[in-house]
Amino acid sequence: MIKLSQNENAFGTPPLALKAIAEQGQEVFRYPDANHEDLIEKLADKHNVKPDNIIVSAGSVALLDMSIMSFVSSGENVVTAEVTWVGYKIIAKIKKKECRLAKLVDNAISLENVLSLCDDKTKLVLLANPNNPTSTMISHDELKEFMRQIPPDVYVVSDEAYAEYITEDDYPDTMELQKTYPNLLIFHTFSKIYGLAGLRIGYAITHPDVIKSLMPYKMPFSIPNLAAAAASAALDDTEYVEKCAAINAEERDFLYTELSGMGFDITVPHGNFVFIDLSSAEERARVDNHLRNVGISVRALEPFGSETALRITVGQPEENRYLVKCLKAVK
């Protein structure tokens, strides 16, 4: 199967990270470092912040779990978008917290609709930017105005899992916004462009006081030394990462042009994936089944909140051209 269903880096893991994995593999009988200070310092240098602004975790799922545990008490609620990353709803449900879902506008997160669902019991707002699965983007000015209206005791997550794929100039400078709004948390992951989805490692950038609130809910020894070493090496492989981003931009534009030209209802994409809304659940199933029968797996989006749409990862050039050929046949 050509796997275009989970938004992984189509070109795999950076070579420097693979080398680090091979070297660190001899030490997996050792317990992990509890703090991973070297990685934290490297991340702090990358983002021009202090180490006490960084917390590393076992992927964004762990960050989300810690945030809900830390900020949302019994009877309080979380607000996010109606069609967005399924993990937000799943973790809120596991933690028995109300999760309010704001309707999209033109397949994009409507910050106005998000605000309308917030009340004095709202303690956490979750914003995927670009949004997964619709691949739409919140701009800097939009997020700045949203933060101005959000009370300081409500924590806002800007989940930037796909930020490295962004090519637009008006993508939010969340590091700058955080100077004014210490209730803003920035999530990053090594699962996407850094090609380490199988090692489960991510991090958040936020105010030191927020880090202190999160730390009691961090699982000890949750980040293997293998993952930390691979992440550190991946940060050094800038040429590889930049190449992946550049090819993705070209191939993403190719898919958007080709699929919109066929008449598919496709949203202008900003991540490493495209979002196609079909006419009905039956049509979505027909297209999905056809692609599976010709060896391509894509993502049906019922768990994300849409019964009529598909999310398709931008693959390697030859994979994308085969995908277009198969979609022409089904169209």
Image (spheres, grey):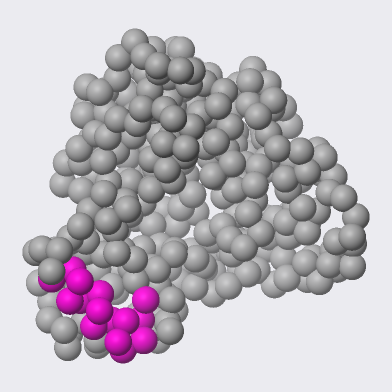
Q: Is residue 36 above or below residue 120?
A: below
Q: Using residue 29 as the reference point, say whether residue 306 is left or right of it.
A: left
Can the viewer see residue 48? yes
- Residue 331, by quadrant, is bottom left
- On screen, residue 77 above or below 197: above
Left or right, 191 with reference to 51: left
State how many labels appear.
0
Report the span colored magenta: 283-297
The quadrant in which residue 211 appears is top right
Which secondary structure class fits the magenta region best? helix
User: Who's the residue at 73% across and 31% down the image?
Assistant: 51
Does the magenta-highlighted stretch encompass residue 292?
yes
Q: Position of residue 157 (x, y in %)?
A: 46, 32
**Is 32 placed left or right of 155 in the picture?**
right
Q: Quadrant of residue 212?
A: top right
Q: Is residue 19 above or below residue 158?
A: below
What is the x, y in percent for residue 187?
53, 40
Report x, y in % for residue 93. 41, 36
Q: Is residue 294 left or right of residue 56?
A: left
Q: Residue at x 17, y 88 (%)?
A: 329
> In which quadrant of the rendered image does the N terminus lie?
bottom left
Question: Measured from the top left, where is residue 310 in percent x and y?
Answer: 26, 64
User: Looking at the image, which is closer to me, 178 or 185?
Assistant: 185
Residue 260 is inside the magenta segment: no
Say if residue 142 shows up in the picture.
no
Rendered view: 81 above or below 115 = below
